């Protein structure tokens, strides 16, 4: 399938694996890229320029296909060495960067000069237009369904994607709630040039996370995610568990007085315990409503081949039959 996104990133299929903390290691990024999609290493999981350089080198050993790096800009107590990470990405020869969080205007000139394409993740039309105006090459439009940070507008993709299509000139991919060939065809119908998946790629053979995480996603239904940190205007969609219910109880009890320190135990530094050790009640971890559509743990290649075959079948048979 050829779209503006496959052309821009030099990939076979219009499917991107979004950056995921403690999931987006070289193993997963390489597997997605080898399967014809665009795999993405999560920059902040590595944390330092040296470690990121090593991860990029490991990925390059595993694939000769294009892959990207995610750079998430968040307000943090200990700010990462962003200039160093940007230099590492450029020196590592990476040609695609997925930015997320705050406006990436400060780093764009460096990437532009080095010929690196930037796709910025946005949860609203106004942020997407801003990304376009500052020179981003593409946008990943993340609807309210998404795992991770859906923003504060709560607009689901059925509305957000056609709205983005009406306003944007640069290409965009649909993100949040995407799992299969139906997702891809629907995304294309609503004006996207491809799709981005997070949660679906965690439940794959190559995702280098504990088996408990994959099984938790397979076992979950679409009813099993919760929104946390809304009172802090840092909303995150996570899988429910004991820690999350405890966190929500604190949010209810403290109301407008809630501070980050009140919930630090449930949210700070929990990813290694969950993703690596498989301690599923250690804290809050991002997961999308799309868990309800995930019932197996295929290889990335089987997953992507299946999505493309299903999309082909829907377009040629089901949709063509209607006209
Ligand atoms: C476990 C997990 C960790 C994530 N970490 C990040 C991150 O560090 N940076 C980022 O930009 N997005 C992150 N995301 C969001 C994904 O890149 C993607 O936008 C989102 O998962 C799409 O929604 P879906 O899960 O419904 O496919 C994360 C998502 C998950 C599920």
Image: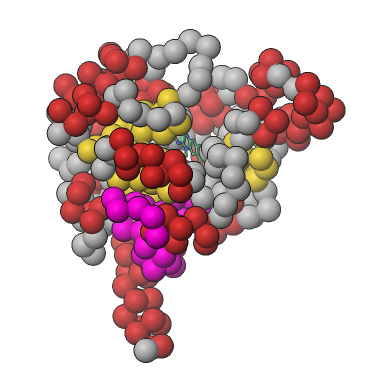
Q: Indicate left or right for 48 with 259 as reference.
A: left
- Please state which of residues 257 and 250 is positioned toward the viewer in this rendering: 257
Write the residue at 29% across / 15% down.
83
Is residue 114 visible in the rendered structure shown here?
Answer: yes
**Which residue is nearer to you in this view: 259 or 241?**
259
Residue beneath the point at 59% across and 56% down:
292
Residue 106's spot in the image, x, y percent?
A: 32, 23
Q: Residue furthest top?
A: 78
The stretch of residues the image draws in magenta is 166-193
Q: Is residue 27 magenta?
A: no
Q: Pinpoint residue 147: horizontal percent, then vertical percent.
A: 54, 43
Looking at the image, which residue is at 66% across and 27% down?
232
Q: Is residue 167 magenta?
A: yes
Q: Position of residue 6 (x, y in %)?
A: 22, 54
Q: Quick one: which residue is furthest to the right in this view?
A: 253
**Residue 303 in view of the camera:** no
């Amino acid at each position: 399938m050829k779209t503006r996104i496959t052309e821009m990133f030099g990939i076979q299929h219009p499917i991107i694996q979004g950056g995921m903390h403690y999931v987006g290691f070289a193993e997963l990024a390489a597997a997605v890229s080898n399967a014809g999609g665009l795999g993405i290493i999560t920059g902040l999981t590595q944390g330092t320029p040296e470690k990121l350089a090593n991860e990029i080198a490991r990925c390059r050993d595993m694939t000769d296909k294009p892959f990207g790096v995610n750079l998430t800009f968040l307000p943090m107590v200990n700010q990462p060495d962003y200039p160093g990470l940007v230099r590492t990405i450029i020196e590592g020869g990476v040609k695609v960067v997925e930015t997320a969080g705050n406006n990436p205007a400060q780093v764009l000139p460096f990437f532009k000069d080095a010929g690196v394409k930037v796709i910025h993740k946005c949860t609203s039309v106004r942020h997407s237009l801003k990304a376009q105006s500052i020179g981003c090459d593409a946008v990943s439009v993340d609807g309210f369904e998404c795992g991770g940070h859906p923003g504060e507008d709560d607009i689901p993709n059925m509305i957000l994607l056609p709205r983005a299509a009406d306003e944007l000139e640069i290409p965009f991919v649909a993100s949040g709630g995407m799992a299969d060939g139906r997702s891809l065809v629907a995304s294309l119908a609503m004006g996207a040039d491809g799709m981005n998946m997070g949660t679906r790629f965690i439940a794959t053979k190559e995702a280098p996370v504990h088996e408990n995480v994959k099984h938790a996603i397979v076992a979950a239904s679409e009813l099993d995610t919760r929104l946390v940190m809304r009172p802090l205007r840092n909303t995150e969609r996570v899988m429910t568990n004991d820690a999350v219910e405890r966190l929500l109880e604190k949010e209810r009890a403290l109301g407008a007085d809630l501070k980050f320190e009140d919930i630090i135990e449930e949210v700070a530094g929990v990813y290694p315990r969950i993703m690596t050790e498989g301690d599923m009640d250690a804290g809050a971890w991002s997961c999308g409503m799309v868990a309800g559509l995930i019932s197996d743990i295929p290889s990335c290649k089987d997953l992507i081949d299946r999505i493309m075959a299903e999309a082909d079948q829907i377009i040629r048979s089901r949709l063509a039959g209607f006209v």
